[in-house]
Amino acid sequence: MFHYHRANVLTAEGRILQLEYATEATKLGPTSLGVCTQSGMVLVAEKRPASSLMLGGALDRILKLDDHLYCAYSGMSADVRSLIGPSQVTCATHWVNYKEFISIASVIENVAQQMMTFGMGEEDDDYDDFSNSDCNCSSSSDSNAESDLENRRLLGTCRPYGAALLFAGYDDDLLELYHMAPTGELKIHGTKAIGSGSEAAEKLLGLYYSCEMDANKVMDLALSSMKVSLGNLILKPVNLEVMLMKPGLQSHKFTEKELEEEIKRLNESGKWFKDI
């Protein structure tokens, strides 16, 4: 049997099915999107409270890694926190040691490396059979085999991470937006959407995005794209999370009241970007 559904086995067509399943999992989550120009960058994330009894902080969809780096996500929250938690520690440790912000590339590459550990922790029947077989091996070889197997189980997960990430940061006097897929593949974007409404959002972003937009236009386009991704429903501040970044480490996370004012401004001015 070829075990094609295992995380570390390629099919005859050259596919890893578990990666495809993880990618589909990210498409079921709430929508998150980013729009970036050198005048300003906006992250917008949809929040879906499972209960009215939940506190707002339990639904954070935009996570702070450091003063110069934030992350929005779609997919499985537990997987995201497993990826982001160590990076937050890395950022803090670098600041304590060197009194400077760590480069965005270093942080993101570490996350990508962690994403690629899937399958290392998966139990391998063939490996177990081999290591337990009656062969004329020395005791030290047996010990090394057991140690190697234990390391494989501890270092990695038995499946890919079901999470897609958007990193928004300021590095070398530039605003940058990165997208990371469950495969660990990393790309830099001017604008990107992930989650269940990503297709509709990216259609609008593709129509109107320009790298020459000022910060106000970036905000208008980001909110308009989120509205389209939700089927043009009325945007409610309680179901949104918005972060604005500007050059010079200027970042601001909008309160519900501020979001309500932004939405009201767009309604009154009619400056919503509309799908054709």
Image (tube, helix red, strand yellow):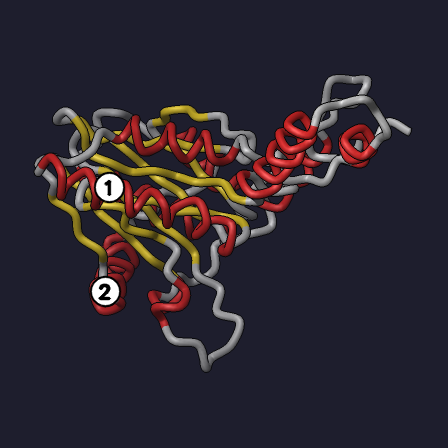
Q: Nearer the viewer, residue 166 or 12?
A: 12
Residue in front for this viewpoint, 199 or 141: 141
Quadrant of the image occupied by residue 109: top left
Disc number for residue 148: none
Q: CA distance from mark 1 to mark 2?
A: 25 Å
Residue denoted by label 1: 91
Query: Could you say where residue 194 lies in the image, as x and y percent from the top left?
Result: 49, 41
Disc 2 secondary structure class:
loop
Q: Is residue 228 visible?
A: no
Residue 266 location, x and y as percent?
27, 54
Position of residue 95 relative to residue 189, above or below, is below
Left or right, 61 with respect to 130, comes to left
**Residue at the image position 19 percent from the left and 40 percent from the top:** 68
Q: Residue at x 78, y 35 (%)?
A: 128
- Residue 172: x %, y % from top left: 15, 24
Q: Is residue 13 above or below residue 213?
A: above
Left or right of residue 119: residue 216: left
Q: Residue at x 57, y 44 (%)?
A: 162
Check if mark 1's residue and mark 2's residue have beta carbons within 8 Å: no
Q: Which residue is mark 2?
A: 255
Image coordinates of residue 66 in percent, x first then y, are 22, 45
Of residues 110 and 105, the one drawn nearer to the viewer in this rendering: 110
**Closer to us: mark 1 or mark 2?**
1
* Crowding at mark 2 (Cα within 10 Å: few <14, some 14-19, many 20+): some
> Of 16 and 227, which appears nearest the observer?
16
Quadrant location of residue 1?
A: top right
Q: Residue at (40%, 68%) from the top-left corner?
A: 58
Q: Amino acid at mark 1?
A: Cys
Mark 1 or 2 closer to N-term? 1
Dot 2 amino acid type = Thr
